[in-house]
Amino acid sequence: MIGILGGTFNPIHYGHLRCAIEVKGLFGLEQVRLIPNAYPPHKESPEVPALLRAQMIDLAIKNHPGLVCDRREIDRYLQSPSKQSFMVDTLASLREDFPEQPLLLFIGNDAFNQLPNWHCWQRLFDYAHIVVMARPGWKAQAFDDLKARVAENAGDLEQAQAGKLFFQAVTLLDISATAIRESFAKQQDPSFLLPDVVIEYIHHHQLYQSPE
Ligand code: ATP
């Protein structure tokens, strides 16, 4: 089984990393692919270019085989810059790469509550299971038309390649990239919210220096 964690990763932090490593173990995943978006549909385009955000991911996961930085949304954007980074397109291309394996798309429950706003969101289930990770301060909504998809046990996800919805508690870390960017802008010390190697990269490239 392959795990997928998409996001802006602006910058990557321990909230992302702890979730990725934890679900990898919980679901016995071969790998978790962290996929930075190039042109996010639901957020303002980040000032920090996707390639730099991807480099920060590379640094953060360097010593963790099984976590992979997947640049397909960036590559797609470089080929056709007018195209937004829609997850449904990303999953379709992952399905081509991994035709036999269940794909598990992990999203925080803040993102899950926005799911009906995602482009062609019902089609996500054609390609992957969706696993909602509990995130501090957010309560997952139960969408009526998804009730039939809810899996009771994690083991059910191995029985099909796609189509199920599962709710998974993870260690709650109240860390957000927004708060980290603010912390840099205010010249505060963000240590222990994200890896030191990423902090050094941010200082070196003088990222997040001014308030948004
Ligand atoms: P921002 O503050 O800029 O909105 P973010 O910290 O939410 O960013 P994203 O890159 O947008 O980070 O998140 C990617 C995915 O990781 C989303 O599904 C999000 O819900 C999830 N996620 C982010 N932070 C956490 C966290 N602390 N715990 C659990 N899930 C998280």
Image (tube, rainbow, N blue to C red):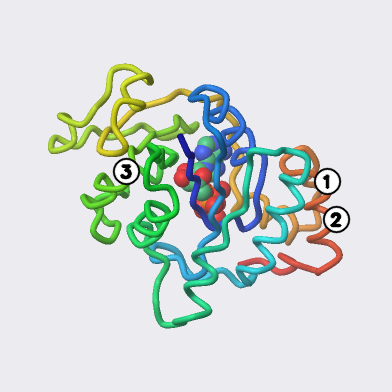
Note whether ligand 1 is within 8 Å of mark 3: no
The residue wearing badge 1 is 196
Quadrant of residue 47 in the image? Answer: bottom right
- Under circle 2, the secondary element is helix
Q: Residue at x 38, y 37 (%)?
A: 102
> What amino acid type should be assigned to the residue bearing mark 1?
Asp
In the picture shown, does residue 4 fall above or below 48? above
Q: Is residue 104 left or right of residue 177?
A: left
Q: Earlier in the sequence, mark 2 or mark 3?
A: 3
The residue wearing badge 3 is 113
Quadrant containing the C terminus is bottom right
Q: Mark 2–mark 1 contact, CB under 8 Å?
A: yes
Q: Residue at x 36, y 26 (%)?
A: 158
Q: Is residue 115 left or right of residue 80?
A: left
Q: Residue at x 63, y 72 (%)?
A: 49
Q: Nearer the viewer, residue 156 or 134?
A: 156
Where residue 126 appears, as percent x and y from the top left, is 24, 47
Q: CA distance from mark 1 to mark 3?
A: 32 Å
Q: CA distance from mark 2 to mark 3?
A: 34 Å
Quadrant of residue 106 in the image? Answer: top left
Quadrant containing the N terminus is top left
- Around disc 1, counting alpha carbons within 10 Å, would you say few (fewer than 14), some (14 to 19), or many (20 or more)? some
The dot on residue 200 is: 2
Q: CA distance from mark 2 to mark 1?
A: 6 Å
> What amino acid type should be assigned to the residue bearing mark 3?
Asn
> What amino acid type should be assigned to the residue bearing mark 2?
Glu
